[in-house]
Amino acid sequence: MKILLVNPISSAGYMSDIFKSYNIHTTAIYTINEDQFTSFHKPNKIWFDKQINVNSTDITTIINELMGAFDYVISGTESATNLSDKLAEYYTPQYMVVGKN
């Protein structure tokens, strides 16, 4: 199983430990400029299996940078929800809810 985490800021260390304990492969993508992280939220190099900083919220740029497949997409912050939804639509269309508007 491969999970994509979008801007996993809150509880990142805890999430990383839990996923690793279940042998779940995780990739964290950060769209936040590195100098915007506080020392408390700054990504640790031992978290997750792979970490990518793209400094962009452009969906095409992110997909090109990731170059992979994912089973699930998880938003790591409230502000990343819209981007996470777009990435989930691309990587996991089978989970899209199609309904009447």
Image (cartoon, helix red, strand yellow):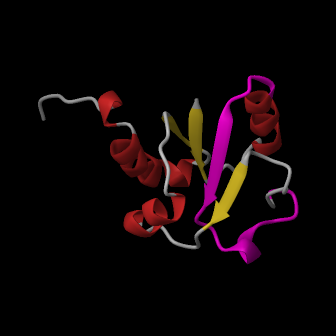
Q: Quadrant of the N terminus?
A: top right
Residue located farthest toward the top when viewing the structure as drawn: 22
Q: Is residue 76 left or right of residue 21?
A: left
Residue located farthest toward the left when viewing the structure as drawn: 100
Q: Which residues are magenta?
A: 21-41
**Residue 32 at x, y = what percent?**
63, 68
Compared to residue 87, the image places residue 53 above or below, namely: below
Q: Residue at x 31, y 36 (%)?
A: 93
Q: Nearer the viewer, residue 101 or 63?
A: 63
Give yes or no for residue 58 being in the magenta stretch: no
Q: Nearer the viewer, residue 24 or 79?
A: 24
Give yes or no for residue 25 being in the magenta stretch: yes
**Residue 69 at x, y = what percent?**
47, 44
Q: Residue at x 58, y 38 (%)?
A: 3
Compared to residue 38, the image places residue 29 above or below, namely: above
**Residue 22 at x, y = what percent?**
74, 22
Q: Nearer the viewer, residue 8 or 26?
A: 26
Compared to residue 84, the image places residue 39 above or below, namely: below
**Residue 101 at x, y = what percent?**
13, 35
Q: Residue at x 48, y 48 (%)?
A: 81
Dividing the picture into quadrants, the one containing residue 41 is bottom right
Q: Count every numbered label the image shows and give the total.
A: 0
